[in-house]
Image (cartoon, rainbow, N blue to C red):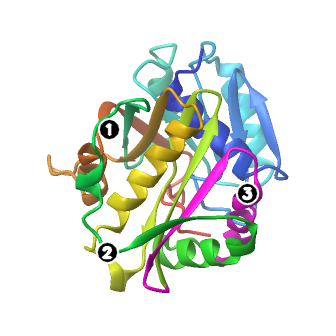
Amino acid sequence: MIPPAELGELEAFRSLLSGEEQAEIGGALCTSFEATRGSALFNRTLGLGLAEPATEAALDAIDNFFSRRGLAYGIPLTPDAQPSELPEWLEARGFRRGYAWTKFARRADLTDDLDHLLGSRLRVKAVSTDRADLFADVFMRAYGTPEVTRPLLERLPDSEGWHCFVAFDGDEPAATGSLFVTGAVGWVGPGGTLPEFRRRGAQGALLAARIEAGREAGCETLVTETGEPIDGQPGGSYRNLERAGFEPLYVRQNYLSSADGDTSGTRA
């Protein structure tokens, strides 16, 4: 069984990349986006070793799925992925370790006061299809995703399960964030703030909006992830999540098939 912390992200990327080639192999989901051939964020295998133990035959099939498309790809592994030899199997196949991520979760129904996240004059608004272009434009400029991802982003406000938000400073769009709901799990997707509006509390306000949206959607658990602390020092996203009541669960290692692989989502 795939745990909520992994299930939310897996189903979000299944939705995000619907229309692109995907495959279910060994209980895991392989996604691809050939417009970003070096992206190990869009081209990767999620949930490996969780629904069922991975096998060498499954790894062969996964490699075939990506290699016949000429794609560098990633395989994230949780500490519970089975069998325990899986990291050694990947390394023997030439995979290298990339930047690891910390997985977080919080109960959606907590009645904690989120006012401490709202110390910003920015207004957060849910956006629908009529502002899809705005959502995509701000996200791309803030997060640094390549232009080829625009069609993916523009369809999110009209896609089942997605809740998309933009923070405004007056009439000026400043930041974005999204939530994807699958069953009782809400995945808090990446947010981005334009450089000129940073350090104004935009992401705290967007987290509060997404937490409330998850409650209203009937979520039991909210999950997300960000990069692990470097030299013991958490980054801004890590601190924002803790302030919003998210608790770190574990560090998930990203294994990359190629030195060209990149998990940031900013490389085409």
- Judge by depth and name the residue closer to the eye, 24 or 187: 187
Q: Quadrant of the N terminus?
A: top right
Query: What residue is rendered at 53% in x and 46% in y?
Result: 213
Left or right: residue 15 versus residue 174 is: right
Left or right: residue 216 versus residue 119 is: right
Q: Which residue is mark 1?
A: 246
In the image, residue 223 above or below residue 195: above
10 Å crowding of disc 3: few (<14), some (14-19), many (20+): many
Q: Is residue 264 magenta?
A: no
Evaluate whether residue 45 shows in this view: no
Q: Where is residue 54 shown, x and y percent of the image?
A: 61, 18
3 vs 2, front mark: 2
Q: Closer to the N terminus: mark 2 or mark 1?
A: 2
* Real-space CA distance between mark 3 and mark 2, rounded to the nearest whole angstrom: 38 Å
Q: Closer to the N terminus: mark 1 or mark 3?
A: 3
SS of the residue under disc 2: loop
SS of the residue under disc 1: loop
Q: Which residue is mark 3?
A: 33
Three-letter residue code for mark 1: Phe
Q: Which residue is mark 2?
A: 121
Q: Which mark is residue 143?
A: none
